[in-house]
Image (tube, rainbow, N blue to C red):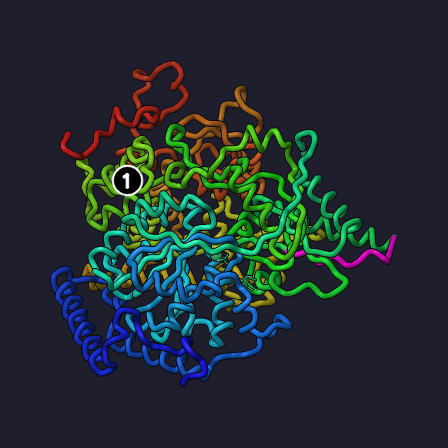
Amino acid sequence: KNPEGSMTRVAQYGSKFMSEAKQRKLEQKREEERLKRLEERSRVNGDPLEKMMPRLNGDQARQSAYQEWQKQAKRQEYGPRSNMSIREQRESLPVFQKRADLVKLVAENDFLVVVGETGSGKTTQITQYLAEEGFAMKGVIACTQPRRVAATSVARRVAQEVGCKIGEEVGYTIRFEDVTSNKTIIKYMTDGMLQREALVDPDLTKYSVIMLDEAHERTIATDVLFALLREAVIRRKGGLKLIVTSATLDSAKFSNYFEQCPVFKIEGRTFPVKIFYTKEPELDYISSCIETVIDVHTNNPPGDILVFLTGKEEIDTCCETLVDKMSLLRGENPSIAELIILPIYSSLPSEMQTRIFEPTPAGKRKVVLATNIAETSVTIDGIYYVIDPGYVKVNAYDPKLGMDSLIVQPISRAQADQRSGRAGRTGPGICYRLYTKNAYLNEMGSNTVPEIQRQNLSYTILMLKAMGIDDVIEFNFMDKPKQNSILTALEELYILDALDENGKLTDFGQRMAFFPMEPLLSKTLIKSIEFGCSDEVITIIAMLSVPDIFYRPREKRDQADKAKARFHDYNGDHLTFLNVYNKWSDAENSRVWCQDNYIHEKSMRRAKDVRKQLIQIMDKLDRKERRPRSSIVSCMGNWDQIRKAFVSGFFKNSAKRAAVHDAEEGSYRTLVENTPVHVHPSSSLFKKHGVDHVIYHTLVLTNKEYMHCVTKIDPKWLVTYAPRFFRSVEPGNMSSKKKNEKIQPLFNRNDPKENWRLSKGRR
Ligand code: CDP
Ligand code: MG
């Protein structure tokens, strides 16, 4: 009867034998019960974030939006981007062949593992199928992504397919940016945001289906969600479905963990990829990349190129060099085709990001220089050539060193295979590996180590504690983190006052967990209220959370650096950021002002937005704790207070100028580990004399260990504001090695067990 067939069927599997009226009644009853439960719970707990809970009007809006959608009134037939209609594009994806089987499996199982080649349509299609089949009647359909760029770009694409504005039926939520409404049916979000929602509503009552996408990436948040959602699905008895999708084949492990659930495979269309290795290890992979791109472009048949690099700086440098080389080459030989050079990394503005998806005009070639994001999260059509230098930048934590740093490391064999696979989606392709076959076979690890086994866990453990999960050692992780890194995290939370001696969450820790940010930052923020400078600290944190404030075009580096120097505060980068923000406010957020001062206007607007949201969170906390007066206070120019507030959070990231004889000029040593570190050349304290003690925001390891965002401090503050961590040592009691240091960390970092015993039963 219905020409659209299954597309407009509202029936839910399992309930399709019920009459519609009966079903609606049941629906209503469930809804009433759910609301009653919610109300009861918020009465018991006095839930502060009840606003995040679904409310009836929200659900009604979503349901009527859904019905509208069902009528297909808003369906757009033709997409602007390709000569295929949107429908044709959708139906050409491998997952489309499996639509019916897939929907049936979801209906019949609480857990499902889906494995499929990248680009087969998992991320963009499965959510839509489920919505079309009526799952959205019972709640929002969510899909998590490890990366912000993937969440936003995929949401935009799906909104386009559905034919709605982003934020209406299809939306996304990433930290400090919520583009959803009460009409939202399909919601893409970072795994970190869903983890936060689980903190407020452990049953995730708002959702009917949750798809944990890109599970093979094994981010900490995804790993934590594995465990939390497993419990939630069981508690909700069929009301919540969990789909775990992965691009690799370690599906048996996932299936085992999720109650032996079925594994559904989607075979992609893949073509053979020829792989070339280098004969010798490459010393300079950047220039080797550039040479290979030019070589492919001038000698090989049409087809776009994808290059994997490790980060923004590398990508920008490569892009610039390529632009220069190409204009030289085409100047000499105008018959060489145009090469469209496009970067993609997470801090790139979104308009730039979408450009990589535009089809390449005939007679031209496109080269995309990407971070690891193009490995599996983002699929670019038309790639025939992949250039893989074999490196990736990861955030790694060394519990022994007690340091978090961004390091560039070799990829695993599984990653190498994923990367080369990108060349074989449209036709037979070629992958140039800029390393030797021997390195591939004998030096690379076979699989990527889950993040949870290499990163700092303090944020995660604070979250778990705030959810009432006290025994973090026994928490049901799929792969347990090393006990040592749990201990280190517990210790870190203890010295931050978030936990007491018994490992129990303190009131202070409870407040810290309220903020979606690393414990060092949340502590600084809360302490800044006492220091009377929360207004300023909020601004600085907002500025720290956006990438790229300063604009530094290559041809105008000197002018840009001079312009930046005018904002420098002699006490360091935190205050320099505050300066920039204040001056921009004085200039009434003017665009011209940004241009004149070599400031990225986009980043400033974003910082303003983050600032606004931080203020909202502070207000919420005030209301929760029934404070009559606002916690947002200004120090009215007494900026020492700001530095003290940062010391109270970042005391662990402190360094002392090294004695001249034991280091190159200008280098420091960390107070915790005595590791040599350097002030990054972009800092306002670079090559500044008379700065003996500093704290830094992050440590980045490139050719040296660099401190980023550095601020001068008074060493006495360390003892005053971090008494659990530092003490002054009487000169007589000092070992000869420590003679020059008047301040000593209390903890013996090499053996956290010495100082920190597990809370469980042993104290
Ligand atoms: O998740 P999976 O890797 O299986 O595939 P997907 O991300 O759903 O991508 C399916 C198709 O959608 C790809 O062929 C992409 O070309 C297209 N797509 C797009 O055009 N723009 C995006 N932002 C994301 C996907
Ligand atoms: Mg995907």
Quarter that holds the C terminus:
top left
The picture places residue 214, in percent across and down from the top left corner, at 44, 52
| Amino acid tagged 1 | Leu
Residue sitting at x 40%, y 75%: 6
Magenta stretch: dominant secondary structure: loop
Magenta residues, start to end:
333-342
The picture places residue 64, in percent across and down from the top left corner, at 33, 81
Q: Which residue is mark 1?
A: 493
Among all residues in the image, which is located at the extreme top?
736
The quarter of the displayed image where residue 208 is located: bottom left
Say whether residue 229 is left or right of residue 160. Answer: left
Q: Secondary structure at mark 1?
A: helix
The mark tally for this picture is 1
Q: Is 339 covered by the magenta stretch?
A: yes
Say whether residue 643 is left or right of residue 322. Answer: left
Above or below: residue 733 compared with residue 677: above
Above or below: residue 345 compared with residue 156: above
Above or below: residue 244 compared with residue 141: above
Q: Nearer the viewer, residue 602 or 398?
A: 398
Q: Is 417 covered by the magenta stretch?
A: no
Say whether residue 698 is left or right of residue 244. Answer: right
Specify whether tag 1 is near ligand 2 (CB below 8 Å): no
The picture places residue 452, in percent across and down from the top left corner, at 37, 40
Report crowding for label 1: few under 14, some 14 to 19, many 20 or more residues within 10 A (C-alpha): many
Residue 560 appears in the rendering: no
Residue sitting at x 59%, y 58%: 380
The picture places residue 357, in percent across and down from the top left corner, at 60, 63
Q: Nearer the viewer, residue 545 or 199?
A: 199
Residue 487 appears in the rendering: yes
Residue sitting at x 35%, y 46%: 254
